[in-house]
Image (spheres, grey):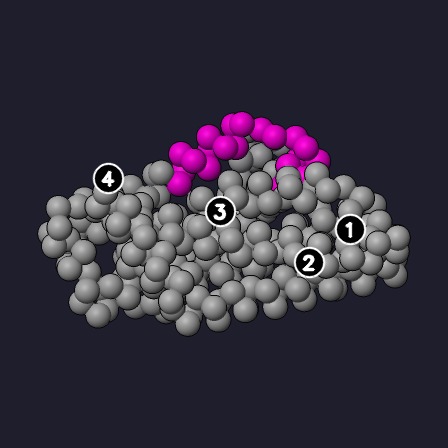
């Protein structure tokens, strides 16, 4: 375990000293800042039925599709490209531990960036007594529910990015593949749910809710926590990381 913690600290250090990480953070803050400003203006001008924070987190797929590929594409692809990959195994450490260390470092950065999004609501809170304050903080529970949902689903999203990076030494290919898989994950569930409603047939059973990410998000924002979703995302994350470890093992064999 000592070797694993050392490797994890090394992966975190690489993220912290890399200029690319701060560029990605800037891109993330600009994207969510633009989304927040647009929604805030819309709420001030027009009456809305859905809380602002819930609408804000409904747009989480766009920043996620941007930062997850950018954060994860360098995890293995860069090691393959510059030939530093085999040096990781100069000490007795397993492929699973290497994959887990890179996953935890990337996931930690992902969560940190989303926690920074809370600063937008805190900044609005300084205008106390205004309409902006009322609509932003009408339901603080929604903010926590939205962040919790992003933290749970982020396990699978980051695992997909690690898996894509473990397949190729080309960072652009890894980034594109991750973006495509995430887009399919976001759009696919919504598409199947809409088709089921249009045809009035529940052909997908419980899988429909498991795939419809936006419906799950609404439930979390409204305080409805389904432990089955936690098991679903944890198990699919573990499965994806197992595929990543198998891909890494293939590279070194």
- Measured as percent of width and height from the top left, residue 144 is found at 64, 41
Crowding near pointer 4: few (<14 within 10 Å), some, many (20+)? Answer: few
Quarter of the image with the N terminus is top left
Q: Which residues are magenta?
A: 217-237
Q: Are marks 1 and 4 in contact (CB under 8 Å)?
A: no
Q: Which residue is mark 1?
A: 136
Instruction: Inspect this view and state whether residue 212 appears.
Output: no
Q: Secondary structure at mark 3?
A: helix
Q: Secondary structure at mark 2?
A: helix
Crowding near pointer 1: few (<14 within 10 Å), some, many (20+)? Answer: many
* 1 or 4: mark nearer the eye: 4
First-in-chain label (2 vs 4): 4
Q: Which residue is mark 4?
A: 1
Q: Are marks 2 and 1 in contact (CB under 8 Å)?
A: no
- Measured as percent of width and height from the top left, residue 200 is found at 67, 34
The Cα atoms of the two marked residues, 1 and 4, are separated by 44 Å
Q: Residue at x 78, y 57 (%)?
A: 126
Locate residue 194 relative to residue 103 in the image: left or right.
right
* 2 or 4: mark nearer the eye: 4
Decide whether the magenta segment is chiefly helix, strand or loop. helix
């Amino acid at each position: 375990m000592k070797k694993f913690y050392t490797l994890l600290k090394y992966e975190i250090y690489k993220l912290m000293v890399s200029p690319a990480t701060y560029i990605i953070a800037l891109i993330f803050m600009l994207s969510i800042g633009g989304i927040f400003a647009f929604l805030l203006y819309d709420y001030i001008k027009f009456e809305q039925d859905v809380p602002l924070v819930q609408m804000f987190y409904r747009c989480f797929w766009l920043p996620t599709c941007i930062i997850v590929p950018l954060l994860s594409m360098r995890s293995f692809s860069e090691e393959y490209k510059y030939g530093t990959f085999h040096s990781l195994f100069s000490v007795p450490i397993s492929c699973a531990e290497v994959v887990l260390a890179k996953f935890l470092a990337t996931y930690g950065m992902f969560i940190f960036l989303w926690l920074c999004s809370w600063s937008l609501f805190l900044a609005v809170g300084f205008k106390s007594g205004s309409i902006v304050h009322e609509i932003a903080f009408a339901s603080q529970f929604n903010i926590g529910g939205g962040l919790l949902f992003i933290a749970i689903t982020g396990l699978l999203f980051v695992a997909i990015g690690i898996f894509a990076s473990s397949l190729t030494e080309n960072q652009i290919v890894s980034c594109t593949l991750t973006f495509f898989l995430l887009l399919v994950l976001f759009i696919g569930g919504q598409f199947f749910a809409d088709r089921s409603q249009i045809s009035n047939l529940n052909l997908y059973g419980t899988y429909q809710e498991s795939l419809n990410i936006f419906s799950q998000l609404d439930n979390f924002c409204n305080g409805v926590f389904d432990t089955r979703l936690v098991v679903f995302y944890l198990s699919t994350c573990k499965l994806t990381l197992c595929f990543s470890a198998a891909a890494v093992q293939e590279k070194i064999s």
